Structure formats: structure tokens, C-alpha cells
Image (cartoon, helix red, strand yellow):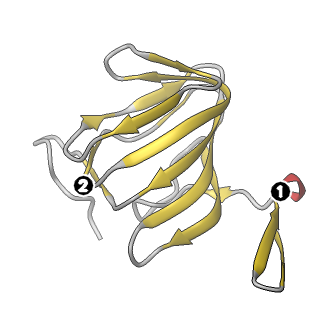
Amino acid sequence: MNAVGTGGRDIIRTAEGGFAPFDQYGRALPGLSWLKLNYDAEAVSGTYLLRFSEGATSLPHTHSALEEFIILEGELVDSDGTVFRKGDFVRFAPGTQHHSAAPHGCLMLVFLHGPNVEIGTDWGQKPPG
């Protein structure tokens, strides 16, 4: 990622790459990568681009806070079968539990307002480590 900052303004040159393995749960998830735009790792909050490679899936998780995203490219299929398409703006309320898949790939802009908690076999188990 190439960040240019002058006069109180930051510009992140997203066209120059900078995507890294998506490791928000403490380990890289296959087929997911992200580009942190304005992200606070300590608060687990901020804005980032999230790329799902073809066939990639997210982990089942619970939203502890509001999460919003807009689909920029491709489609995302939620665990209840809802298909989110390019241009769709989606809002998940705190307490929502789900996972998503991108059969043909997807790029989205995410606005995360707090951590997600990985769902284990007992719906609510935090990830190890």
C-alpha cells in the first residue's frame, strides 16, 4: 500500500496493491485478503477493503457491534441464502450470527464498528489464542 499524506490529508493508492491475508481472527483465512484503509487493530474497528477469492468463505461469526459494507465487485451469498450484489449496501446489527461465501469472488468496502467473534461448535466460542 502506498500512502501519501500532506496538509492533514492521507491518500492510499489502492490501485498499487497492498492487500494482505485477512487475519482478523488471529490467523489467515484461505481466499480472503484485506487492505486496511483506516483501521484500528486494538479497537478492531475501522474501514477496509475485503476481497473474497472465487469460492472463499468467511468463518461463522457473531457481530458484537454494527458492521456495514458495500459490494464493489462480484456477489456474496449469506448463510441464509441472501445474495448481495454489486452496489448493495448491507448493515448487520450487533448480535447477528452468520457466515458468507463468494462462489465467483467479491470485493467489498467494510465499515466495522467493533470485533466479530468466531462461532465455534457451541455458537459463541471465541477463537483460540
Quadrant placement of the N terminus: bottom right
The disc placed on residue 127 is none
Asked if residue 1 can be seen in this view, the reply is no
Q: Residues within 10 Å of mark 2 (few under 14, many from 20)?
A: some
Q: Position of residue 82 (x, y in %)?
A: 40, 15
Dot 2 falls on a residue whose secondary structure is loop
Quadrant placement of the C terminus: bottom left
Q: Do the CB atoms of the residues marked 1 and 2 lie less than 8 Å apart?
A: no
Q: The residue under label 1 is which amino acid type? A: Gly
Corner quadrant of residue 31: top right
The disc placed on residue 17 is 1
60, 44: nearer the viewer: 44
80 to 4, vertically: above or below: above
63 to 129, vertically: above or below: above
Which residue is at a point 26% across and 64% down the rendered structure image? Answer: 128
Q: For mark 2, what is the residue?
A: 64
